[in-house]
Amino acid sequence: MFVLGNLMDALAAVINVVLQLLLLVVFVNALLSWVRPDPSNPIVMTLERISDMVCYPIRRLFPTIVSGIDLAPFIAMLAIWLIQMFLVRTLQDVALRMG
């Protein structure tokens, strides 16, 4: 059973890194929206695509623009953080109990 425990622990670590990177991308894109760099820059385009992939469903479900400020990145970061805390800790606890 310890092999499955190690697998769960490794899976939790990978998910944690992916969610951290997603959180960072959404945060950086929110900061860049205040500065408005060149939209044809490939890095900016990539950050926009990834961030919009996360924020678009939130924008579709809720009216997120309040006084000209888009709250979708904040809601997305909060959701990612909650998923990270729940999913990663649950997988780590399962891994600990298995091995």
Image: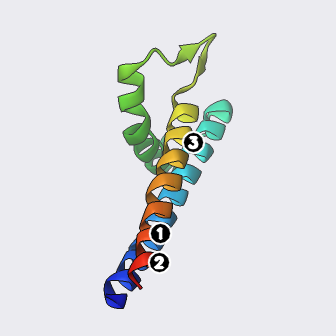
Q: Amino acid at mark 2?
A: Leu
Residue located beneath label 3 in the image: 29
Above/below status of 99 relative to 83: below
Element type at marker 1? helix
Residue of label 1: 93
In the figure, 67 relative to 31: above or below?
above
36 lies left or right of 92: right
**In the rendered structure, which amino acid carries the disc numbered 1?**
Asp
Alpha carbon distance from label 1 to label 2: 5 Å
- Binning the other alpha carbons within 10 Å of mark 2 as few (below 14), some (14 to 19) or many (20 upward) gives some
Q: Earlier in the sequence, mark 3 or mark 2?
A: 3
In the image, what residue type sits under mark 3? Asn
- Residue at image point 47% right, 70% down: 92
Q: Label 2 belongs to which residue?
A: 96
Whether pointer 3 and pointer 2 mark residues with C-beta atoms closer than 8 Å, the reply is no
Residue 69's x, y, as percent? 62, 19
Q: Quadrant of the N terminus?
A: bottom left
Residue that appears at 48% across and 72% down: 13
Front: mark 1 or 3: 1
In the depicted view, which residue is nearer to us: 88 or 64?
88
1 or 3: tag closer to the N-terminus: 3
Badge 3: few (under 14), some or many (20 or more) residues near its Cα, within 10 Å? many
* Quarter that holds the C terminus: bottom left
State whether residue 98 is above or below residue 61.
below
**Is the Cβ of the residue at disc 1 closer than 8 Å to that at disc 2?**
yes
Q: Residue furthest front?
A: 97
